[in-house]
Amino acid sequence: MFQGFPFYISRRVYLPGLVYLLLATTLCTPPSHAQKRGQLSHIQLPPGFVIDIYADKVPNARSLALGEQGTVFVGTRSGNGCVYAVVDADGDFHADKVYTLACEMNSPNGVAFRNGSLFVAEVNRVVRWDNIESKLKNPGKPALVTEQLPNDQHHGWKYLAFGPDDKLYLPVGAPCNICERLDDRRYASIMRMNADGSELEVFASGIRNSVGFAFHPSSKELWFTDNGRDWLGDNLPPDELNRAAKAGLHFGYPYCHAGDVPDPEFGQDNACADYVPPVQKLGAHVAALGMLFYQGNMFPAVYRDKILIAEHGSWNRPDPLGYRITAVSLEDNRATDYSVFAEGWRHNGEVWGRPVDLLELPDGSLLVSDDYAGKIYRISYKQ
């Protein structure tokens, strides 16, 4: 059990909630009509790539996980708090059935699958369904893994994944836009624990709000995206792609952002050189979420080991940025290129989709969840 969490003590919290609400509503209110297949023609991809609808009617589709029998499990952040199981029974890459496993959960964003069991991360706890693919129609109540997590809703939704050490990793976001929480080390961190919930510990600190990470296929090191703070202007700070080469590293928040942007409220007594800089600065306020290292054989060989990142899209820039999937090329753990792989979910000033998470299927194609449209897309390559 992770112990020692005294009462909330914070120097300052700045969250202009009314402005957030007005801007988010303006930019992110879904259209009243159903998304049409023709909108996919707006998506621009490199030559040879094709995007199709894998599953529709998956409200608020967020994090994705793949079961041993090919079931795609889907977490959600808002709406009715549901977890879904998407089944493509005939293997034509179009879902035949979407099962609702549970609803009325507390932002069950994170999903992970291991040894027949589905793990789901809510804001304040992690639960588990055993032998889930044999009982999709009637999964029953889940078992409790841990409830030793904060209950804050602000940045409370969680990503979830197993590491190469068989431990379960999950982030705990900062409960604010910008604040210092010296009283509770869980905040602004990525934590890990055993699959049974024991030995919960902080793995990395200084991480404002990570909603996506993956482990390098060779080094097994943790790489993760992080969402930068708001209200420093349209172009500051950039979102980040980071590498945690070992446990115990600090990535700067709330003192320094993106490696070289001292925070005006908390950075006066803390040098940016004291913290781990990002491997790649991403677009400012793009809301970088899910990511993966592409390992399949379907895409051209140049994509092997590239990092693909779902950029959900900004809410507080006059000129919105994101609504796309980007690619980062690496050489010796250094980024050598950051470019757009797929874009067009914002077309002619209208937002009709927002990519959230990425999942590679066994055939090498790529699934993309969209919480705005309530759909899952499949990107494939046809020579």
Image (cartoon, rainbow, N blue to C red):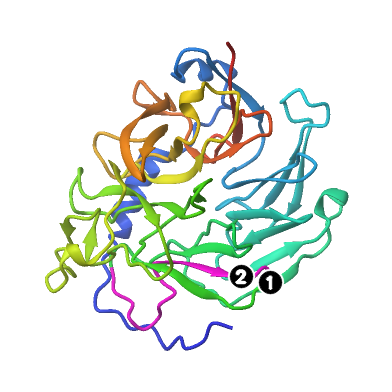
Q: Secondary structure at mark 2?
A: loop
In the image, residue 21 lies at what x, y percent?
Answer: 36, 52
Q: In the shown orientation, is residue 328 left or right of residue 64?
A: left
Q: Amino acid at mark 2?
A: Arg
* Label drawn at residue 168: none
- Mark 1 packing: few (<14 Cα in 10 Å), some, or many (20+)? some
Residue 28's spot in the image, x, y percent?
A: 42, 40
Using residue 344 as the reference point, say whether residue 254 is left or right of it.
left
Q: How many marks?
A: 2
Q: Amino acid at mark 1?
A: Val
State whether residue 267 is above or below residue 314.
below
**Residue 57's quadrant in the figure?**
top right
Horizontal and vertical percent position of residue 197: 65, 74
Reading the image, the residue beneath label 1 is 145
Residue pushed farthest left?
268
Q: Which residues are magenta?
A: 179-196
- Quadrant for residue 95, please give it: top right
163 lies left or right of 185: right
Q: Secondary structure at mark 1?
A: strand
Q: Nearer the viewer, residue 322 or 347?
A: 322
Tell me what residue is drawn at x 53 percent, y 62 percent: 170
Location of the C terminus by quadrant is: top right
Q: Is residue 44 magenta?
A: no
Tell me where residue 321 appears, x and y as whole percent: 31, 35
Left or right, 113 with reference to 167 = right
Give the residue number, with chain letter if any, for mark 2: 125
